[in-house]
């Protein structure tokens, strides 16, 4: 616990826990960080709308009310909440076919999903299900996000080439582009390559340079000066002003809710996992305390705000959190500054967006997808734990070739299977005294005795119905094959923190053997 965390407890406020206390000399840094975050997050948020299939302005909405709500009601001083590529991809996969992409009905369904997702997140808090986030292992998450990245990048290629595209899942998207390759719009391709060059080049110089913003502004100026709208698709009119606040206008029915529940649940799992991991990492970095329970309420309210303001699901973003941290942001005050910058853009700067070529957003989305593809992480898992690598690879392939929703479900199943597999067949050992008098672990196959007639058997996991048979079998084999004959068998249960009914019966039967 740090002095700052002690002070925050003294405030005793149910709100502003991610902001108070704050020192006066820190405020200028928070303002700079907030403006920097806005410069980098606004183009990215507009790009995420290409993934979600919603109008560009909805990306700006994710950085307004939802971001402000988490800043006020969240606990983490560092977590940045806004549009996210993974949840945007899950959303698009969940409502495709229910409405025309980009239509008013589609946007309303996206808003409904935000509210339903908020419900799952808040329920997880109320009935103490936040631990569910721990069941999506880091290994599986690498595979899942890599699969998302491949799908997102492939989906952006058609926009970069200026062709219509089409199809679903990665294979369909790629085949559609191949069929239309003779229709490439070279104006769009040139713009997309220029945007990529500016963004990648600026990052090579310094990650603090808002390359995406420079590319967007430059493309708008160029488009207006050269009348590029006559040669390629541009955004067209973008509504300005504040978002309309109210419930989504959809034909509510139990059938509709039933269709949306799997998607909302999948997004809530990703939110729980990604947000918790990011908050924990930064709390540990700065030796601060945070409450995941309070963060869940903040995330739930942020998504309710998203749904009521006509935009899509928001999530804790590791990349935006890193951007804010690198810019000097140490509290949620920087997020309020970002929200104010977005408000100014909505009120005064939406008209120039009409000149922005679609290829600009496609290029930004393509880079987002490439950044999600974690080849380095996959290699690291492969080197350190081969079995977990195959789990990550299977998850990635399911996301790429089957679908995002199926991928997240499989990711959870594989994580639980991997966890169960470890407890189902624990690697138990025998303990023997070394020459220095210290107990050392030996494989069971050695049948090593700690002293003549004494075996010390260590069971390395909780004993439950799935491994009770292994427990009984190993003890029987040790007793029957002991040489010299066994007089005592000592059970080292230091790693056993629970014994269920089946295991207890096994213990009782063995005690009379």
Image (spheres, helix red, strand yellow):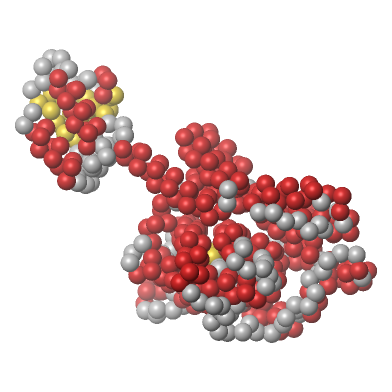
Q: Which residue is rendered at x = 26% and y = 24% of the image?
A: 444
- Residue at image position (74%, 83%) is 348
- The reply, left or right, for residue 339 in relation to residue 71 is right
**Residue found at the very far left of the displayed protein:** 512
Q: In this view, does 67 lie above or below 203?
A: below
Residue 230 horizontal/vertical position (percent): 91, 68
Residue that extends furthest to the top in the rendered view of this protein: 484
Res. 203 image quadrant: bottom right
Where residue 100 sits, quadrant-wise, is: bottom right
Q: In which quarter of the image is the N terminus?
A: bottom left
Residue 487: image location, x then y, percent: 8, 22
**Can the viewer see residue 66?**
no
Q: Position of residue 92 (x, y in %)?
A: 61, 62
Q: Is residue 281 above or below residue 34?
A: above
Residue in view at x 11 percent, y 32 percent: 510
Q: In this view, does 434 lie above or below 144?
A: above
Q: Residue furthest right?
A: 226
Say left or right for 201 vs 498: right
Q: How many marks?
A: 0
Q: Which residue is drawn at 22% across and 20% down?
A: 447
Locate the C terminus by quadrant. top left
Residue 292 in sight from this viewpoint = yes
Residue 370 horizontal side relative to residue 315, left or right: right
Q: Which of 500 and 332 is in front in this view?
A: 500
What is the x, y in percent for residue 49?
67, 66
């Amino acid at each position: 616990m740090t002095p700052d965390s002690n002070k925050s407890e003294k405030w005793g406020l149910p709100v502003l826990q991610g902001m108070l206390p704050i020192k006066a000399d820190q405020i200028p840094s928070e303002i700079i960080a907030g403006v920097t975050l806005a410069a980098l997050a606004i183009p990215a948020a507009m790009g995420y709308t290409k993934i979600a299939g919603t109008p560009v302005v909805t990306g700006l909405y994710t950085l307004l009310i939802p971001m402000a709500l988490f800043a006020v009601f969240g606990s983490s001083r560092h977590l940045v909440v806004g549009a996210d590529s993974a949840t945007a991809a899950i959303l698009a996969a969940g409502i495709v076919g229910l409405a025309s992409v980009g239509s008013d009905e589609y946007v309303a369904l996206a808003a409904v999903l935000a509210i339903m997702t908020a419900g799952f997140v808040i329920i997880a808090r109320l009935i103490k299900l936040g631990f569910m986030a721990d069941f999506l292992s880091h290994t599986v998450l690498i595979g899942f996000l890599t699969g998302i990245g491949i799908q997102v990048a492939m989906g952006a290629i058609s926009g970069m080439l200026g062709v219509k595209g089409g199809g679903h899942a990665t294979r369909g998207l790629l085949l559609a582009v191949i069929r239309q390759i003779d229709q490439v719009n070279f104006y769009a391709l040139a713009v997309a390559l220029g945007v990529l060059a500016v963004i990648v080049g600026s990052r090579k110089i310094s990650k603090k340079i808002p390359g995406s913003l420079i590319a967007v502004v430059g493309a708008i100026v160029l488009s207006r000066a050269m009348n590029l709208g006559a040669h390629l698709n541009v955004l067209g009119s973008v509504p300005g002003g504040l978002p309309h606040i109210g419930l989504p206008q959809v034909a509510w029915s139990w059938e509709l809710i039933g269709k949306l529940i799997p998607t909302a649940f999948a997004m809530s799992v990703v939110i729980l996992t990604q947000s918790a991991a990011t908050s924990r990492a930064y709390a540990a970095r700065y030796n601060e305390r945070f409450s995941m329970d309070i963060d869940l309420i903040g995330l739930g309210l942020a998504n309710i705000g998203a749904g009521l303001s006509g935009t899509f699901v928001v999530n804790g973003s590791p990349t935006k959190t890193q951007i804010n941290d690198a810019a000097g942001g140490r509290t949620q005050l920087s997020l309020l500054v970002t929200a104010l910058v977005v408000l100014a853009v909505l009120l005064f700067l939406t008209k120039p967006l009409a000149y922005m070529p679609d290829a600009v957003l496609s290029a930004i989305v393509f880079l987002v997808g490439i950044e999600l593809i974690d080849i380095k992480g996959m290699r690291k898992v492969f080197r350190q734990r081969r079995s977990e690598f195959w789990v990550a690879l299977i998850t990635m392939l399911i996301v790429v070739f089957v679908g995002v929703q199926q991928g997240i479900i499989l990711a959870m199943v594989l994580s639980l299977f991997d966890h169960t597999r470890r407890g189902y067949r624990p690697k138990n050992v025998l303990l023997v005294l070394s020459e220095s008098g210290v107990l050392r672990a030996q494989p069971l196959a050695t049948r090593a005795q700690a002293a003549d007639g004494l075996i010390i058997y260590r069971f390395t996991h909780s004993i439950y119905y799935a491994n009770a048979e292994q427990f009984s079998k190993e003890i029987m084999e040790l007793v029957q094959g002991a040489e010299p004959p066994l007089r005592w068998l000592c059970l080292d249960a230091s790693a056993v923190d629970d014994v269920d009914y089946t295991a207890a019966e096994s213990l009782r039967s063995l005690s009379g053997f």
